[in-house]
Image: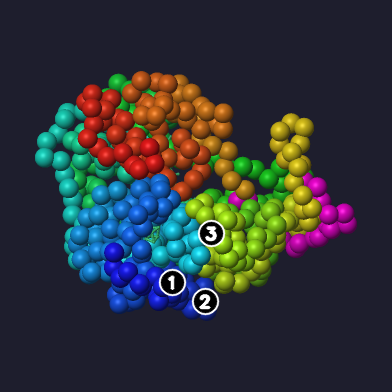
Amino acid sequence: MGDSKAFMIIRREMPKKRTISERVRDYNEVYLPMAEDKLKAQASRCMDCGVPFCHSGCPLGNLIPDWNDLVYRGRWKEAIDALHATNNFPEFTGKLCPAPCEDACVLNINDDPVTIKQVEVSIIERAWKEGWVLAEPPAIRTGKRVAIIGSGPAGLACAQQLNRAGHTVTVLEKDDKIGGLIRYGIPDFKMDKHLLDLRLAQLEEEGILFRAGVIVGVDITAEELRCSFDAIVVATGSIAPRDLDVPGRELGGIHYAMDYLTQQNRKIAGLTVDDAEFISAEGKHVLIVGGGDTGADCYGTALRQGALSVTQFQIHPEPPKDKPELNPWWPTPALILRTGPAHEEGGVRAWGAHTTHLEGDENGNIKALHAVEVERIEKSADGGRQIVPVPGSEKVYPANLILIAIGYTGPHRPGLLNDLGVAFDKRGNVHTDSDYQTNVPGVFAAGDSRRGQSLIVWAIAEGREAAHGVDKYLMGTSRLPLTAYK
Ligand SMILES: Cc1cc2nc3c(=O)[nH]c(=O)nc-3n(C[C@H](O)[C@H](O)[C@H](O)COP(=O)(O)OP(=O)(O)OC[C@H]3O[C@@H](n4cnc5c(N)ncnc54)[C@H](O)[C@@H]3O)c2cc1C
Ligand code: SF4
């Protein structure tokens, strides 16, 4: 434990952000690095609890008090070793995770939690700078071949674990570049993509084979895959978008969030984008339907593209700004207002707003969105939800671009998943046993395709767990570590 009294004296401090006027003019990261002395002071707030709830808040079971202490003492090399022991890609989680560990931190009962995420990202950034992140190829190969379908964080974590266990791993990806949603979904202002490329270079050096631009189920059949590999891991994500089922949906100027975000990410990376097809918010009234992270990413992107106005619709009412003095939700996340950097940059959030219909102009393009204020949400007779509006609350919002960000319905089934013959759970995700094996022997699943649209930290955790299951299937036993939540 760093300093036994620090948590009583030192207040939580977050890293500084670039000014709003500067950051909305580019797509560079919002947060600035934290000075070492400040970071050590923040790490010293950790109480090294007898029962560290941060461990259980983190799906990876990260050894948080250990590396807080090591950072406080300036033992950075040991800190990265402790961090890598449970997390293959701390730069992804350090930059992008909503940090359930901080919600669970014991200090969060009556104070502000330790800045765990900032300590994490600072450790890995230091490690990259010092050249401590090296390839760790296996000493011997088992001769077993594993195909991993999908190169998001679940597929990549699974690949690294299995490769280190000595198996020959091929990652197949339908996009032209490796990385899954980290490559084409998440905007650069949240995480610069050079971090993904650095990590991919390490994975390649370790001997993992990458094949981008291959749609498995089309370019390679499920049958061919089964003949060529000893085990298969489905890590195809869950990006079949939920549609906005209201009159006027067919109008021009209405797009899914992912189509919009992917184009901008490609443009920043200098990749080909069809100019005629490019969806731009410039000079437009932009309405984002959906109050989650994907919506917030559209929000920040639209502001950077020069939108005339940006409004994000959220069906639920505005949560309280502050947590109650004694947070009754601890150690689970508090239902308080969370404001990401994008929401500070301009635009507005419309709370308790429900879209009723969309209105077009004479050319068949979107002109306005009609919405009502939600009084309450009830369960409908068919088990769905029934919106009860506030009488007379209809409002009309001018709109030239509508982005749909109301979630995902599950993994894409036609082709690969149907051809493999895997079973699905009642939520429509790939069903597995506790070893992450599907009903088809030798076929495993991990990440969003198994648990539904979730978080990067969960994808990495599932990739690690599935690797253990595959290794056990191939070798009869496995020494690959399981995560703490199992
Ligand atoms: C816009 C957006 C922003 C997000 N922001 C955050 C955030 O800030 N923090 C956070 O923790 N989480 C965030 N998430 C969620 C997070 O990105 C996902 O939970 C995570 O990426 C899931 O990882 P995965 O490996 O399971 O799947 P994915 O990352 O979705 O990767 C699956 C890959 O499989 C490929 N694939 C699919 N089918 C085939 C096929 N037949 N053949 C070959 N390849 C195939 C896909 O092209 C894709 O590259 C965000 C999600 C979105 C959509
Ligand atoms: S719960 Fe918070 S204070 Fe306790 S060990 Fe974890 S990070 Fe430190």
Residue drawn where x is 35% and y is 48% of the image:
61
- The residue nearer to you, when weighing 95 against 308, is 95
Residue 136, position in %: x, y?
17, 48
- 426 with respect to 471 (left or right): right
Query: Which residue was labeled with disc 1?
Result: 12
Report whether the residue tagged 3 is closer than 8 Å to ligand 1: yes
Confirm or deny contact between disc 3 and disc 2 (CB under 8 A).
no
Ligand 2 position by quadrant = bottom left
Task: Name the front one of labels 3 and 1.
Answer: 1
Q: CA distance from mark 1 to mark 2?
A: 22 Å
User: Which secondary structure lies at badge 2?
Assistant: helix
- 403 with respect to 152 (left or right): right
Looking at the rendering, which quadrant does residue 421 occupy? Answer: top left
Query: Which residue was labeled with disc 3?
Result: 297
Residue 444, position in %: x, y?
37, 29
- 312 with respect to 219 (left or right): right
The range drawn in magenta is: 387-405
Query: Which residue was labeled with disc 2?
Result: 20
- 468 relative to 440, above or below: below
Residue drawn where x is 74% and y is 31% of the image:
382
